[in-house]
Image: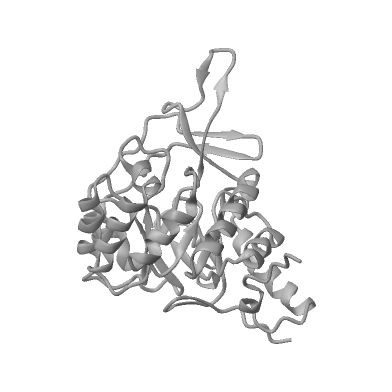
Amino acid sequence: MNVDLTVSLGSLKLKNPVLVASGTFGYGTEYAQLIDVSKLGGIITKTITSRPRPGNPAPRIWEVAGGMLNSIGLANVGVDAFIAEKLSALKDIGTTVIVNVAGSTVEEYWEVVDKLEPHSGFDAYEINVSCPNVKDEGMAFGSNARMTEKIVSGIRKRTSRPIIPKLTPNVTAIAEVARACENSGADALSMINTLVGMSVDVESRRPRLATVTGGYSGPSIKPVALAKLYEARQAVSLPLIGIGGISKTTDALEFIITGATAVEIGTANYVNPQITLEIISGLFKYCEKHSVAKVSDLIGTLQLD
């Protein structure tokens, strides 16, 4: 059976629904010796900011039951060095390239986009308004619908490329923020970023992370991520990208059936660099087994009666 794995995030066409999550795949080329990156639906770069960031002090990663805590702090080379040193290598990568963008002020988001806009080598923006491990205004942006709308609408005025805000789960009602993104011109939504978590060394009575709390990711957050995606699916008509605890084909299928057009694989890349390709193959086999001609036919097919 010839299964069509292509999906569309608005005007953005993907060869299959499997992307790699920002912060787990470097700038996009680091995994090239481990997997054929061109077989992915797309890559999302690590977050790019207006100026270089060294990140948070160590320790900033800690493994916990069912996942990991990270407090990397958006360490990156900054937009100027990204353009000069990293972007050209992405032009021949053979798949969709999405640049993740963040800022400490509204204007910084706009500054990064202004600098990237004249350049080729990438197809869309993922807007990180949600990272909980940066000790500045980042969390406030993603928790405030009006602030999120201001960021996204400003970016919309600056680009015709697709805009994909990445939402935080650390809010009371994610639907409100999702609607603000839709109203301000977003093309799709990434659902979700990490949960806030922490771990304590009982012998020293000190936190495991230098920043005390960090972003909790991994298999244990999947039920939360699914619920947030379901909530957003009821609130907006935008395409959704499911993220959170996806480590096997059935995980990806749960998100797609719940309403995700595509999925991002994050923490699982550290455990098994081949996991993305295995999930792509698994989606094909599932569709073949169930006589589904197009994987897109599975999107939002959750049965509630």
Whether residue 276 is situated above or below residue 147 in the rendered picture: below
Nearer the observer, 94 or 108: 108
Q: Residue at x 28, y 49 (%)?
A: 103
Name of the residue lying farthest toward the bottom: 2
Nearer the observer, 264 or 256: 256
Q: From this viewpoint, is residue 25 visible? A: no
Q: In which quadrant will I find the N terminus?
A: bottom right
Nearer the observer, 27 or 208: 208
Whether residue 290 is situated above or below residue 116 in the rendered picture: below
Q: Measuring from the top left, give residue 102's x and y in whole percent.
A: 32, 51
Q: Residue at x 56, y 79 (%)?
A: 6
| Residue 45: quadrant of the picture | bottom left
Whether residue 101 is situated above or below residue 212 in the rendered picture: below
Left or right, 256 with respect to 78, comes to: right
Q: Residue at x 78, y 77 (%)?
A: 290
Q: Measuring from the top left, give residue 192's x and y in whole percent.
A: 51, 53
Q: Measuring from the top left, give residue 211's x and y in whole percent.
A: 41, 28
| Residue 18: quadrant of the picture | bottom right
Q: Residue at x 69, y 62 (%)?
A: 249
Q: How many marks?
A: 0
Q: From this viewpoint, is residue 219 visible? A: yes
Q: Measuring from the top left, give residue 25's x and y in whole percent.
A: 47, 55
Whether residue 14 is situated above or below residue 181 in the rendered picture: below
Left or right, 153 with respect to 24, comes to: left
Q: In which quadrant will I find the C terminus?
A: bottom right
| Residue 287: quadrant of the picture | bottom right
Colouring scheme applied when the structure was drawn: one colour
Left or right, 163 with respect to 21, comes to: left
Nearer the observer, 25 or 180: 180
Name of the residue lying farthest toward the right: 289
